[in-house]
Amino acid sequence: MEKFKAFLKRKDIVLSARRYGIDALGAMAQGLFCSLLIGTIINTVGTQFHIEWLSRTVATLGSGDHAISYTVGGLASAMSGPAMAAAIGYALHCPPLVLFSLITVGFSANALGGAGGPLAVLFVAIIAAEVGKAVSKETKVDILVTPLVTIGVGVALSAWWAPAIGKAAMSIGNFIMWATDLQPFWMGVLVSVTVGVALTLPISSAAICASFQLVGLAGGAAVAGCCAQMVGFAVMSFRENRWGGLVSQGLGTSMLQMPNIVRNPRIWIAPTLTSAITGPIATCLFHMQMNGSPISSGMGTCGLVGQIGVWTGWVAPSAEALSKGAAAIVPGAWDWAGLVWICFLLPALLCPLINLGCRKLGWVKDGDLTLA
């Protein structure tokens, strides 16, 4: 046993909740931000401001009906799996050959994981990285052995685990679709809370909403829940993270708070309660619908995609929304007021207020929301 412990120490393999649940998870969120989310923001800016070099196709893979075209933002988004895995490897102090091999591991885990891709990358990349570290520099043909072992373990685990993780993530979508059949109030509560929580977890809320074609009133509730998490975390953590945190969480992702949630789950109370409040307000008071592309229902304020989706749904509903009876409208003052209050003002007001109560109860303290 002592020899094994000495081996782990020499290889810098630390079997701890902090190393995997905080360091690796936090790095993974940054990798996601630097790929998928930045790509989404670039695409949104290019499309909405008609910036030709950001919105034009810069690469095409395949030919004919199977051709896939990519913009600059599309290329960034397509690299989300490799970026997350490489970030995890960096957090785990992987040597170069292991770190570079994780690029393939991340791609496979994310591709096979579907809506659960980020979570699959987290689990698979951690194990592949630690196994790779264990064999690194143990043979005279390290340049062959280390990549082969790291990629072999990673791809095998991806094929074994990732589809099941993706299926589990999609079960959240089944719950959401059940909730859409409820009365507007309870539908607003459940859809808003569930999609908002999914947005912050290391799974893809956008993929879930797209897969289940979540539009209409339920799409509006989903947007409300996502905004409650993103704007809520951004504003209530302003004293710790200042303007950088406000932008990275408010326009990027609330997933950046996952390491802090692992440390202290009570910091999640305020954003989640906020989503439970803003969801039914969106459905029952403002009747806010998201009739743009279904993926926008799960994006929140990331690149303002959720808000652009609501606006697009007003003036030119998506095919999915049209198939469910949506029609173009001329938005009035009440529609615009609902969009602003639900997406920005209420989360910015309610979340810090609820968090203040948590602070007074001693559940949240200074530093609990500080981003790494």
Image: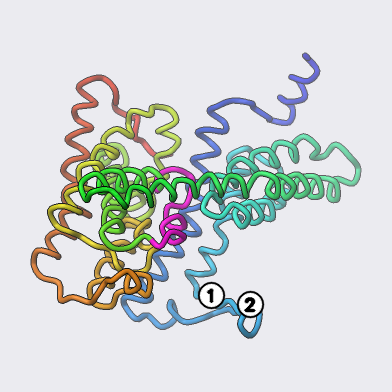
Horizontal side, residue 146 vs residue 16: left or right: right
* 357 vs 183, nearest the viewer: 183
Name the residue rendered at 77%, 14% in the picture.
2
Q: Earlier in the sequence, mark 1 or mark 2?
A: 2
- Start-end of magenta stretch: 199-213
Task: Name the amino acid, label 2.
Answer: Leu
Name the residue rendered at 80%, 45% in the picture.
149
- Which residue in the protein does label 1 denote? 70
Horizontal side, residue 131 vs residue 52: left or right: right
- Which residue in the protein does label 2 denote? 61
Horizontal side, residue 13 vs residue 277: left or right: right
Which percent across, then down, holds residue 129? 69, 41
Question: What numbered label is drawn on residue 130?
Answer: none
Which percent across, then down, holds residue 40? 42, 64
By secondary structure, the bulk of the magenta-drawn segment is best described as helix
Name the residue rendered at 28%, 51% in the picture.
227
Horizontal side, residue 36 vs residue 304: left or right: right
Which percent across, then down, holds residue 274? 23, 41
Distance of mark 1 from mark 2, alpha carbons? Answer: 8 Å
Task: Name the amino acid, label 1.
Answer: Tyr
Is the residue under label 2 in contact with that under label 1 (CB below 8 Å)? yes
Quadrant placement of the N terminus: top right
Which percent across, then down, holds residue 104? 69, 55
* 7 vs 159, nearest the viewer: 159
Q: Furthest-left residue in view?
A: 333
Q: Where 14 sits versus 213, above or below?
A: above
